Image: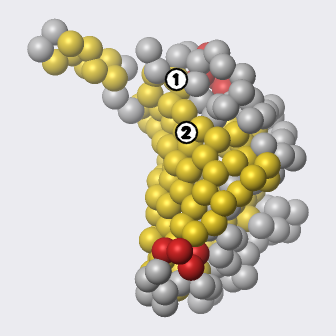
Amino acid sequence: MAIFVGGKELDTWVDLGGGSQSSATTHVDFAWDSFRTDGYKIFKVYVTDLWLTDGYKFEIAFLTASNTVPSVGMYGGAFAHGEADPDIPDYDIRFQNQARIPVSANQASAALSGTYRGNFEFTVNTGNDAVGGVPNYWWHGTMRIAGTLASNIAGGGTCTQNARYGIRMTTSGPTANHLLRMRYKVLGMKNV
C-alpha cells in the first residue's frame, strides 16, 4: 500500500498476519513467500509475551521451503547487558555458520516460570534477486536471561542459504516443547 505525500509515494508497513501460541511447542513458523511474490521484501516480526522453559535460549531460523530450515549459514553478532551485568563486552558474542540465530545472545532464559516475559522486534530484508548474503537481519528486545537478568539485547547478521521462504521462532532445544507461550505480528513492506 502506498501513500502519497506532496506528490511523492511513501511505502508503509502492511499487516501480513500473526498469532499466539498458548501451549508448549517446538517452534512457530510464518511463511512470507507468497507475500514476496506480491513484492514485499522487507519484514518486521514482533514477538511479545515470550516465555521459554528456563535454561533454554530464544533462537530464530529462516525457512528455505515449508517446514525446512538450513543446517548452516547464519552469521553475525549480538550483545546483552542489563540488571546483573551492565558491561556489554561480558556478553558480546559472534556466531559463524550456525543453523539458528542466537536472539538471546547465547544466554538462557531466566523467566522465573513466566513471571518475566520477553519482547523483540526483528527486521529482515529478504532482498530482490541476489542469492548470497540475503536475508540480512537485525533485532532489538528484552527478556530476563541468566547472565544479565532483565536485559537489553540486540544483534544482526546475514544468512548465506537463500532462505527467503519464511521465519521459524524456536529455542536452543528445537526438538522439544520449550517454547511455552508467545504472541507475534508480521508486517511487510515492498522494496521498490
Identify the residue at image location x=51%, y=53%: 139
Where residue 86 appears, as percent x and y from the top left, is 44, 83
User: In the figure, is residue 66 to the left or right of 78?
Assistant: right
User: In the figure, is residue 144 to the left or right of 163?
Assistant: left
Where residue 181 appears, as percent x and y from the top left, is 62, 68
Which residue is denoted by mark 1 in the rendering? 40
Which residue is denoted by mark 2 in the rendering? 124
Identify the residue at image location x=63%, y=34%: 135
Q: Is residue 152 visible?
A: yes
Give the total number of marks visible in the rendering: 2
Identify the residue at image location x=61%, y=46%: 157
Could you tell me which quadrant the C terminus lies in?
A: top left
Foreground: disc 2 or disc 1? 2
User: In the figure, is residue 13 to the left or right of 10?
Assistant: right
Q: Which label's residue is closer to the chain start, 2 or 1?
A: 1
Q: Is residue 27 above or below residue 62?
A: below
Query: In this view of the protein, which residue sits in the foreground, 105 or 38?
Result: 105
Within the image, what quadrant is residue 169 found in? bottom right
Within the image, what quadrant is residue 166 found in? top right
Seen as rendered, the residue at the extreme left is 6
User: In the figure, is residue 124 to the left or right of 60?
Assistant: left
> What kind of element bears circle 2?
strand
Query: Three-letter amino acid code at disc 1?
Result: Tyr
Q: Residue 145 got which mark?
A: none
Could you tell me which quadrant the N terminus lies in?
A: top left
Where residue 151 appears, as percent x and y from the top left, is 47, 77
Query: Three-letter amino acid code at disc 2?
Result: Val
Residue count near mark 2 (Cα–Cα under 10 Å), binned few <14, some 14–19, many ≥20 = many
Identify the residue at image location x=74%, y=35%: 160
